[in-house]
Amino acid sequence: MECQIEVNKKHCNCTYDSCPRKGVCCECVAYHRAQNQLPACYFPKDVERTYDRSVEKFLSLHLKKR
């Protein structure tokens, strides 16, 4: 299966425009996983803009809703 970079970019909410992994989801996930983070697509737009992509931030967003 070929990566559909342009299609992926249309749905990517990452605001870091110069990222070389933008639209290449498998590379993005691998990069953030190595950093103990989650990719931008796991976060709402307002939170993504803070660039805090930590697992702790993700959990804090979802644990508040319980």
Image (cartoon, rainbow, N blue to C red):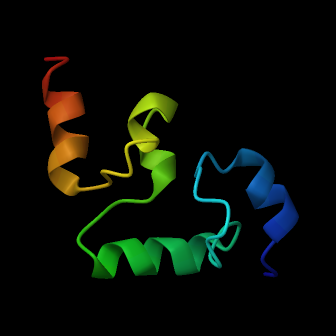
Q: Percent from the top left, x then y, of residue 14?
A: 58, 52
What residue is drawn where x is 15% and y is 35%? 60
Up/down of 40 relative to 35, above or below = above
Q: Is residue 40 left or right of residue 10?
A: left
Q: Is residue 27 left or right of residue 1?
A: left
Up/down of 36 relative to 16, above or below = below
Q: Percent from the top left, x then y, of residue 38?
A: 35, 60
What residue is drawn where x is 32% and y is 74%? 33
What residue is drawn where x is 86% and y is 63%? 6
In the rendered view of the protein, which quadrant contains the C terminus?
top left
Point out the residue furthest to the top here.
66
In the rendered view of the protein, which quadrant contains the N terminus?
bottom right
Q: Is residue 47 left or right of residue 23?
A: left
Q: Percent from the top left, x then y, of residue 44?
A: 45, 32
Up/down of 4 relative to 20, above or below = above
What residue is drawn where x is 44% and y is 42%? 48
Q: Percent from the top left, x then y, of residue 64?
A: 14, 21
Number of numbered discs overlaid on the protein picture: 0
Residue 37, quarter of picture: bottom left
Q: Is residue 29 left or right of residue 1?
A: left
Q: Nearer the viewer, residue 57 or 15?
A: 15
